[in-house]
């Protein structure tokens, strides 16, 4: 029986038995929000994972200098009360007095300088270097003031400070070291972390000394329990059985059945995440790789009916991005992109011209929903590319990808919710561990686009990169994500378009 049918039967059975009623009611009285996710987090340290799960966790347990309002996307003060840009490569921050970390220590300029300099140092080997490699250094200008020097202008710099630069407590992290910190992290956010079992669970408790007046506010719910499970089916089972109050990235087919449950609610929201197909154009996996041929890659683009996947599988208003970026991001020029229609006959012709009239065998690794991966697999099989689908845990696939072991893989990228192409294209095309194109021309254009404060110069550089990437069919954007959330009706939860669940704003009804 297909997974979606099994889940449908499970939902019907749960409705008949009313299994969610008593556990959910009991849970509200315990004041613990039980969250279940399938993207297990091997390291909770914000700078040493690039999973969306990690971003979600660090926004609950850590604060950054800047806050981005989820409704307006306006940048507001957080750990910094104000900032000035005296020149294009300098940001001066005034810091908030009276803030405490979870261990009771005071927040000062030393913590900011330590954090910024650590993540900007290539020797630190953070998970996403492109988020920080534009920073030169931070220097203390007073107990509550810091100057940050940039290697080059970055128009999106303050968004990065808001979304991917939470602040470490210097003294504590130096005392326990990187490994000790990952086991018992300390931040300055609205929730403190009380227990971490890597890849298994994370427990949070409201930080009673959280600073007054924060735009995040003091959490209404006292505790959170985050557990990791292996797959979407287990997530749904936990929700139906009353052992979870909140899940996300549900199979869209389950939206209506879940909403028929008397004690559950399912909602949808398009996010800035896009699904993609990465192709080893650079030959990192070996010289015998058919994907090093442009016509093979173009055949793959023609072979996949991306609109059908968006409309019939993802649903909810999912779109097919023309360019390798989210449509609203600055520099995401759809008109510069070379278009590929769904054309299986053209795909077969291109494969024959490339020397593969009978197709070839290849591994298709994936951590997206199995039915989405199966759809891509079927489209490839139809033109003779015998793709063997290998469903992996997210962290395992990312590890293999960075090691250069994957000829073809499906994944997704949420740009850390930063509305600028500098948060997506450099990650996949700057010559780093995730770059399977290794195109010096593209790398140069991305550097130009990320190094200017002139919008027209940036647009021209990014458009040139987009044209080359799509012309060469390096990396296929498949669809935008429409995130489906399932949660207890007793939970007052608001989803936001930046794909950041803000549990510190949630409350019981």
Image (cartoon, rainbow, N blue to C red):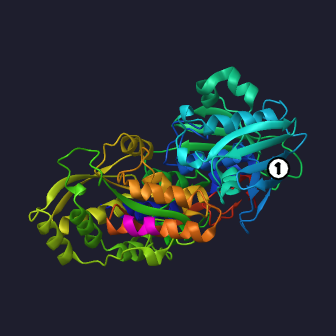
Q: How many marks do you count on the picture?
A: 1
Vertical relation: 165 (above or below) 374: above
Q: Residue at x 25, y 71 (%)?
A: 303
Q: Nearer the viewer, residue 431 or 403?
A: 431
Vertical relation: 179 (above or below) 437: above
Residue 284 sits inside the magenta stretch: no
Vertical relation: 25 (above or below) 172: below
Residue 455 x %, y %: 62, 69
Vertical relation: 226 (above or below) 76: above
Residue 192 x %, y %: 73, 38
**Side (left or right) of 469 relative to 455:** left
Q: Nearer the viewer, residue 17 or 217?
A: 217
The residue wearing badge 1 is 218
Q: Residue at x 63, y 51 (%)?
A: 152
Residue 450 x %, y %: 57, 58
**Side (left or right) of 5 relative to 461:** left
Residue 344 x %, y %: 21, 75
Main secondary structure found in the magenta portion: helix
Q: What's the magenta region?
A: 464-469
**Quadrant including the C terminus:** bottom right
Residue 465 sits inside the magenta stretch: yes
């Amino acid at each position: 029986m297909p997974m979606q049918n099994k889940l449908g039967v499970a939902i019907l059975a749960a409705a008949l038995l009313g299994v969610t009623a008593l556990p959910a009611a009991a849970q509200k009285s315990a004041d613990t929000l039980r969250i279940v996710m399938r993207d297990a987090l091997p390291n909770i340290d914000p700078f040493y994972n690039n999973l969306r799960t990690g971003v979600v966790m660090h926004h609950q347990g850590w604060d950054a200098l800047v806050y981005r309002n989820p409704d307006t996307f306006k940048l507001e003060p957080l750990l910094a009360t104000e900032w000035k840009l005296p020149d294009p490569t300098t940001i001066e921050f005034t810091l908030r007095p009276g803030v405490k970390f979870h261990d009771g220590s005071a927040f000062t300029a030393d913590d900011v300088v330590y954090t910024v300099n650590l993540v900007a140092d290539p020797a630190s080997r953070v998970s996403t270097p492109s988020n920080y490699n534009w920073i030169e250094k931070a220097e203390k200008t007073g107990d509550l003031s810091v100057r940050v020097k940039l290697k080059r202008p970055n128009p999106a710099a303050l968004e990065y400070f808001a979304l991917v630069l939470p602040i470490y407590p210097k003294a504590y992290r130096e005392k326990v070291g990187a490994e000790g910190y990952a086991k018992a992290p300390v931040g300055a956010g609205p929730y403190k972390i009380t227990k971490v079992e890597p890849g298994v669970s994370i427990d949070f408790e409201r930080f009673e000394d959280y600073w007054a007046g924060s735009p995040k506010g003091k959490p209404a719910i006292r505790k959170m329990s985050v557990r990791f499970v292996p797959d979407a089916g287990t997530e749904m089972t936990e929700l139906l059985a009353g052992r979870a109050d909140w899940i996300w990235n549900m199979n869209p087919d389950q939206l209506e059945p879940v909403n028929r449950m008397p004690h559950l609610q399912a909602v949808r929201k398009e996010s800035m995440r896009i699904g993609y197909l990465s192709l080893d154009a650079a030959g990192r996996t070996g010289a015998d790789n058919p994907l090093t041929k442009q016509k093979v890659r173009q055949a793959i683009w023609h072979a996949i009916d991306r609109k059908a996947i968006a409309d019939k599988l993802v649903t909810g208003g999912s779109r097919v991005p023309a360019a390798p970026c989210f449509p609203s991001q600055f520099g995401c020029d759809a008109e510069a992109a070379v278009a590929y229609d769904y054309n299986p006959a053209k795909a077969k012709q291109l494969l024959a011209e490339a020397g593969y009239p009978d197709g070839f065998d290849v591994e298709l690794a994936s951590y997206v929903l199995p039915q989405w991966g199966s759809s891509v697999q079927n489209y490839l099989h139809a033109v003779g590319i015998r793709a063997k689908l290998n469903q992996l845990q997210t962290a395992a696939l990312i590890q293999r990808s960075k090691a250069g072991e994957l000829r073809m893989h499906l994944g997704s990228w949420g740009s850390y919710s930063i509305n600028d192409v500098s948060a997506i294209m450099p990650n996949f095309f700057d010559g780093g561990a995730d770059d399977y194109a290794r195109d010096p021309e593209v790398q140069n254009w991305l550097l130009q686009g990320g190094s200017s404060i002139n919008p027209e110069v940036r647009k021209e550089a990014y458009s040139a990169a987009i044209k080359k990437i799509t012309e060469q069919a390096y990396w296929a954007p498949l669809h935008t994500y429409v995130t489906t959330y399932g949660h207890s009706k007793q939970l007052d939860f608001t989803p936001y378009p930046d794909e950041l669940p803000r549990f510190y704003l949630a409350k019981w009804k």
